[in-house]
Image (spheres, coloured by chain):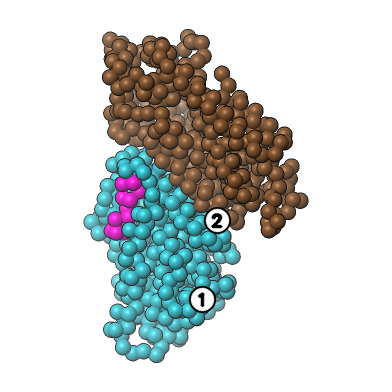
Chain colours: A cyan, B brown
Amino acid sequence: MAIPWRLCWRWTTGATSTRVLETICGFNGRSATFAASSLRGTGAVACSGYEGMSSRPVHTTSKGNYILTSRHKSRLLYPTPKPCCCKRIHSDAKLKDPFTLAQKDLNHLYDDIKKELFVSKSELKSLCDYYFDGKGKAFRPMIVVLMARACNIHSNRDGDLLPGQRSIAMISEMIHTASLVHDDVIDGSDKRRGKTTINEVWGERKAILAGDFILSAASMALARIGNNTVVSVLSQVIEDLVRGEFMQLGSKENENERFKHYLEKNFKKTASLIANSCKAVSILVNSDPEVHEIAFQYGRNVGIAFQLVDDVLDFTACASQLGKPSATDLKLGLATGPVLFACQQFPELHAMIMRRFSTSGDVDRAWQYVLESDGVDQTNYLAQRYCQEAIRQISLLRPSPERDALIRLTEMVLTRDK
Amino acid sequence: MSLRCLLSDELSDVAMHVRKLVGTKHPLLNTARGFIYDSRNNLQMRGLVVLLMSKAAGPSQHTASDLLTQDMVSGIYPSQRNLAEITELIHTAFLVHRGIVNLKEWTNSDGPLKDMQFGNKMSVLSGDFLLANACTGLAQLNNTKVVELISSAIGDLVQGTYHEMPNSLEDNSLTDEINMVTWEEQTFLSHGALLAKSCQAAMELAKHDKDAQGLAYKYAKHLSLGHKLNSDLQLFVKSSSADPVTFSFNSAPVVFHRQIVGQERWCHQLQQAKTIGRQIDYTKLRSTIKLEKGVTSTIDLCHYHGNKALESIQCFPSSEARSALENIARAVTKF
């Protein structure tokens, strides 16, 4: 079920841009037409359930490339989609709020996770419990429980979570946390979520062990669900996470390859977990592979959008909001979306990317270039496209409050500021 | 399967990067070297024991089992073979993760800091890669009981390894209370759990009953403990060589000794063994220990575990594989 990642992405002449957009994101013809017509500035295109969108102005640079600009600072392309049959916006908004809907299921999530981390030595226990203090966003478990309910309703059952589905919500958060703990050692980070990192407090050796333990506990919980397919699906995530980290080690020479590499890395590091967790909960309630695919695609697209926005925030947010310092990616030698786009306007960035911003002054100069370019806007636009695809996918499920919450969630991904 | 993993792009990348570590003092270099060159460590003993155990247990007796005897190759099911490889992957992953250094303890004599940082990065990544492959391998076994069992073994490995680490920079193990019961528990976690649970899992994969699983587990548990005791004893039973000796105060003969002579005498003996520069004279300390019953107690315990291992394996039907396992148990506990 591999999603074909195509190569070329360069924003070139209008004739090829439709294909280009379609191919980067693996979208089908329908969304591509939607985008293409927006490129040509033809105004509103009808999409079921959504209000018409404003046309996006297009202009060419001196180099003959089309570059999209947005006049407004908001990342939203169109206003909040309303459900087809209902006009009462305010109560709908409350109903559809993902956090509120997921609240009940997530109430004791962190406590339950801590129960899974059954360890005798008290110091190791403190390390393992360190990030399960309820201060995380619990973004992934929220998506998982909403998707589970949406799938349950789609499958003619009541919305309530199956026990295995709730486990998957916990497991996804555990796998995510274990990878964060290891990432902090790899990156030498001293702050996360406003706290000093485990490696900074207890040292690298113990931090790695704690990460391994959380992973083993997640694996045990996974096995206990008793479903071989679900075990396979989520084990794949663990492999993807590591491969994603490896992908960050190398830099690609070729500009075209770079962007493809970047998107694939984003999938492995961020989207795979969400996509496969969504797929796993759908497997538990429904045997139709089309439903699994819908769940997977929603997760994948939201996941990539999430990472793209994350990469933007690294440039635009200031340190206090994030809980960790920004321009981190540059300082780690990583070229993310905004930089890759900015490269087109500022070819000086090529050399800097290849040497991973290691020369003194590179980080600051690169940051300047990015902020002067439209790299941020372009990355935001790309994130929007992924969210649109996520919405398109999830809309194929039977209507439910949870399904609508998942739609609302894509907006939240786009408009978050930390 | 582990061959595919070893030949993967990722590990080739790591190999390239590890070359940059040559000349530095990062432990990963030793681990990698040991993996390639040291035939003793490279025996892949755990995998071998799992394979032999699978063979010794023979085909499944369960009439309800859907495992076909013709799927067996040399008397071992493919799933059991894969399990043996997975066990080695996990063992290696932990060897690699154990080699990570605490950067705060870095001093100038360790070489450039960035070498240590780089070595750490490679260690984390390669260890994680091996573990990830173990996880996907486990998933492919299509047996959630086995996944749970082996995952719990990983948890045991973590706990066992964690116990070996001091609580702070000041090493209190010199004067802390410790006894052999605790030693056995901790050593089982770090040196025995993986093999024991793997052997049990191998039985499960072939749909053998709980009794067979228990016997396999016991054999591996006692074998592992016996092996560790043997390894700890080497320094105390070999005729003294010219090489300077150091040993861990957590090694069995020392722990036994401390338990036998008591806290006070031990502290006194430590003092006696310190040179003018307050360094410990290990050779002198070793002589002191050899005068008491620590060493002989350890030898007795080693024999005990060897016998327990033999007891367990002899419940299986007689075969070449069983004989091989008996020989391993005898060899490991021989003096």
Eyeballing the image, is B99 above or below A382? above
> Which sits in the foreground, B101 or A221?
A221
Residue at figure coordinates x 59%, y 41% from the top left: B216
Q: Determine whether B112 is above or below A258 in the image.
A: above
The magenta-colored residue range is A125-136
Subunit bearing disc 1 = A
**Residue type for callout 2:** Thr
Left or right of A130 on screen, residue A116: right
Question: Is residue A11 visible to us here?
Answer: no
Q: Is residue B154 left or right of residue B77?
A: left
Residue placed at 39% from the left, 85% from the top? A83
The secondary element bearing badge 2 is classed as: helix
Nearer to us: label 2 or label 1: 2
Which x, y percent locates residue B255? 39, 24
Q: Secondary structure at mark 1?
A: helix
Per the image, the residue denoted by label 1 is A32
Residue wearing tag 2: B144
Q: Is residue A206 visible?
A: yes
Please identify the quarter of the rendering in which residue B15 is found: top right
